[in-house]
Image (cartoon, rainbow, N blue to C red):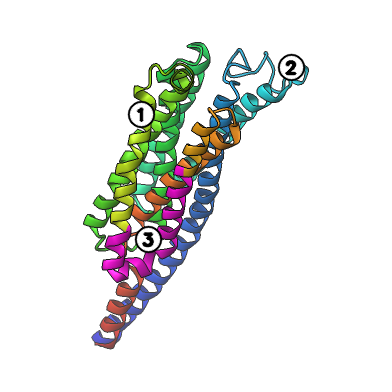
Amino acid sequence: MVFKSNLLCKIIGFNHLINNQLYKSKYLTIFKRLGSHSVLALIALIVIGGATRVMEAGLACPDWPLCYGSFLPFNHMNLRVFLEWFHRLDAFLVGILILFKFSLSIIWKNEIPNWLPKTYSLLLFLVIVQGSFGALTVINLLDSYTVTGHLLIAFLLLITTISINQNLENDDIEEPLIWWRFLMFFPLLLTLIQSFIGVRLSSTWSAHICLSFNKQCLILNTHKLFAFPISISILLIIATAIYKRSLLNENWKYLSALIFLLFFQIALGVLSLKTNLNEPIFIIGHQLNASLFIAILTTLIFRNPFTKKGLNHSLNSQMVGINS
């Protein structure tokens, strides 16, 4: 009788575990899909922001958050006004999407990992700060530091969103390779600094002044020099992955994209300088490439090779208990 009672309890526990995992899978799938849309929207937002800056459209809408006092300024519409208006619209939609994910995480907090609502609250905070910087860029008439902060917060939003997505994909990480993450962190940090210098370069007109009058070349020279440590760090990562064959097998698609983006970024930078920054397509492509570079580095940091745990281990333990 005692044996039947114990067996029944274990079967009930086993069924509860299965149902719980299915519910979690259902909810987490929704967050994964929303997260993928968020990444695409953020990359588009960064690129459109770069196009707005290159086309000198940052003040095309003289007021904020509306544009010429209306949501859709038909009477003032031209290319520059459209870029600034669309940039704000995309930012608004990204904010709504993140607010929606945060709300879902609160509603489903009992069915999802505990870290998810907390991380979404951080993401929502970054959106608020990003919107504030967007307003300040207009109020402060495109102040260089404000524009730079605006872009860096956008990159932080992208990094945080990708880290959430990867943690959802790898919810069963047990033993991440810390040294691999540390190795990836260096080029990511260097790329963020490089982007900071790049925005300072364009927002202070230092590049044009240097190329035209050979003055104020410090920022431009620093921007060019930073390509060397970034390139060396990426080549070191590739060499490490080749040495540790398992890392290459796990990540070869991302590593191939990373090396391609590195050389393509250098080529775009050279072309931008060769054309005296007069070809917007090269500068906008440079911004897009930097966004993709940061996205792939972040993905590699959070998709470490890992040891499976969770459902498989739990099911095995339950089966062992039932069999015993």
**Element carrying mark 1:** helix
Q: Earlier in the sequence, mark 1 or mark 3?
A: 3
The magenta span reads 238-266
**Element carrying mark 2:** helix
Residue 307, placed above or below residue 58: below
Is residue 195 a member of the stretch shown in magenta? Answer: no
Q: Which mark is residue 249?
A: none
Give x and y (percent) for residue 307: 28, 68
Residue 122, placed above or below residue 80: below
Residue carrying label 1: 221
Give x and y (percent) for residue 166: 40, 55
Q: Earlier in the sequence, mark 1 or mark 2?
A: 2
Give x and y (percent) for residue 148: 42, 25
Which residue occupies the foreground of this view, 180 or 56? 56
Q: Residue furthest left?
A: 179
Residue carrying label 2: 76
> In the rendered image, which quarter contains the C terminus?
bottom left
